[in-house]
Amino acid sequence: MARVEMKKPSQCTAGPVTSASIRGPLNMLQMIAASSYGPTGRLKHVHNGSGGYVITTSQSSALLSGLSISHPVLQLLVSSVRNHVSHFNDGGLFAVILCCNLIDRCLTLPLSPHKVIAMNKRLLDMCLSYLTSEDCACKLKVDFSCNSSFFDLTRSVLSSKPACMLTIKEVDYISILVVKAFLFKVPLESRSNMILGRTVMVPVEGLSVMESTLVPGVLIEMPGSSWNRILALSDLPPANIKLALFSISMSGDFSDTGDGSVDVVDSVDPEQVMLEQLLALGKQLVDGHVHVLVCQKVIHPSLMRYLKEQKILANRDVCVYTHTSLFCLLCPAVIATAGAQSIASLSSLSSACYGSLGQISKMSHGNKQYLHLIPSDTSVCSFLLCNRNETSLKELVRVCQTAEHTLNHLLKDPWLLLGGGCTETHLAAYVRYKNANIHSSHLEGQNCSVAEYKLVSDCFSSCLESAARSLEHDGGDSLTDLQDGHVWSIPPNSTLDFNCIETGQKCGCQLLGKGDDMEWSMLGSGHKAFSPRSSTGVSPLLMNKEPLVVDSFTAKYNGLKVAVNTAGLILDLAYVIKDEN
């Protein structure tokens, strides 16, 4: 009998946020996120202490999934942001920076956590209400009659990740391909049950970025041995090629029985029974005039031999193999391309399960060979994405997926927010202005004084400005103008007199140019409250016509909510109970 060990008592920590054990790791997490933020963010090498795969990235999804977090409070923070990133694919670093800043600065306030949380919630509601109002001057309406908004958003996403190692020309080229892929999968006709098409990312290492291209349909990579065994595609019909898609093994084993058991009678040979079932299935495929068979795992050799004996080539059939992991990635795209249903049974088949392809061909790109499944009329395309090495290629794939995801959000919320830190500084200016002359009658039910509310309001605004300052990594300073509340960067060791800096200076989002009569203040130094001008109040002479730096409205809007709500949840923690067993 094994020795029974006594269970260890659970560890209970009181005041987990105020303890010294959390302040250091919290500041470290904030530093990691802030130093990775923006186009000039510093890259991070993420790997575990015992070795293994190394990730070089500055993207939130890769960073947060690669970090090993042991403290329960930080696990809560990271889990909350990762959930946001899984839904919106963007805004993760912004949420981490703002959340960490709020926790750190709110702990220094001489107020109870409950008061601070309630006031932060009120300030959050003020920001969200402003962002959704028609008077908001830090958002832009997407014009679907032209593609400039799509290009601005895609270019901003691609430029924000230096690990992709793209030149300006390459950024523009990939942006065009991403936008084309997005437009390709949008149905031409508007319907109530409209479904977007799919874009399949096909990474190709070792080629120039400029060799990336879009291909309609689905590409299935074929190893050299399988490539040579593919039957002559010239024997296929020119159109209406039938396809059957199996999501189970056709090898004849019992690997899919799960935790169940199979009772076998002595006179029954299980292998022979399975083989007969497979051969009967093969006959159904032949009788159904199926031309393409895509299987998740392995096809039994006897079944393959039977198909050849039945002159499958004469009946214009082809068998295709894919690896399990590749199949899992391509299965939804193949279903969308052919209109097929995934078959998970070896019993009798329905013709409704079969799909149809417009054409099948072989294709080579670089040193790789692909089977090209061309759809008849569905909006599915493959994005052959090339880059020079594995690290930059994987980062580019992640970034292009993020860009694609943010473009999808425009169909539901056709708005963009000003990027480059301008939305954060503009919101900070708006919050300061709205609360500069607040009266106690406006705080009924808040259980706080005007002085306390202004203290929390200033802390909230400073955290927004700190997120904007995190975009500067080269020792420069950040200014804000006192007319529109945008952020402006100046080089290190330059004069603080902004009027002496060379003309042509533009704000972080590239929307505004410098004017002679503009007033300035160091960002974060405290300045007089002012009412930011609406977009209609800005002189057209000050507005640039060049590409803008923009953010996804949906992602940043939700990221702002996640940051403030998560900070409030953590500030409200009284105990952390950890099971030691």
Image (cartoon, rainbow, N blue to C red):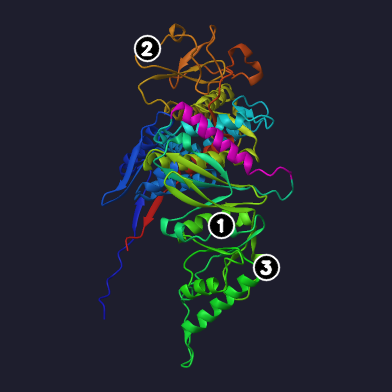
- Residue span colored magenta: 167-190
Is the residue marked by circle 2 packed among few (<14), some (14-19), or many (20+) residues within 10 Å?
A: few
Whether residue 168 is in magenta: the answer is yes
The three-letter amino acid code for the residue at tag 2 is Ser
Q: Nearer the viewer, mark 3 or mark 2?
A: 3
- The quadrant of the picture occupied by the N terminus is bottom left
Q: Which residue is mark 2?
A: 494
Depth check, front residue: 2 or 113 = 2
Q: Quadrant of the C terminus?
A: bottom left
Q: Main secondary structure of the magenta part?
A: helix
Residue 37 is situated, as x and y percent measured from the top left of the image, at 42, 33
Find disc 1 in the rendering and name its residue: 233
**Amino acid type, label 3:** Ser
Q: Is residue 158 left or right of residue 351?
A: left
Q: Nearer the viewer, residue 398 or 69?
A: 398
Q: Tell me the amino acid under the disc marked 1.
A: Leu
Q: Is residue 413 left or right of residue 524?
A: right
* Residue bearing mark 3: 351
Asked whether the viewer can see residue 460, the reply is: no
Element type where label 1 sits in the image: helix
- Dot 1, crowdedness within 10 Å: few (<14), some or many (≥20)? some
Name the spot of residue 292 as percent of width and height, x first: 58, 62
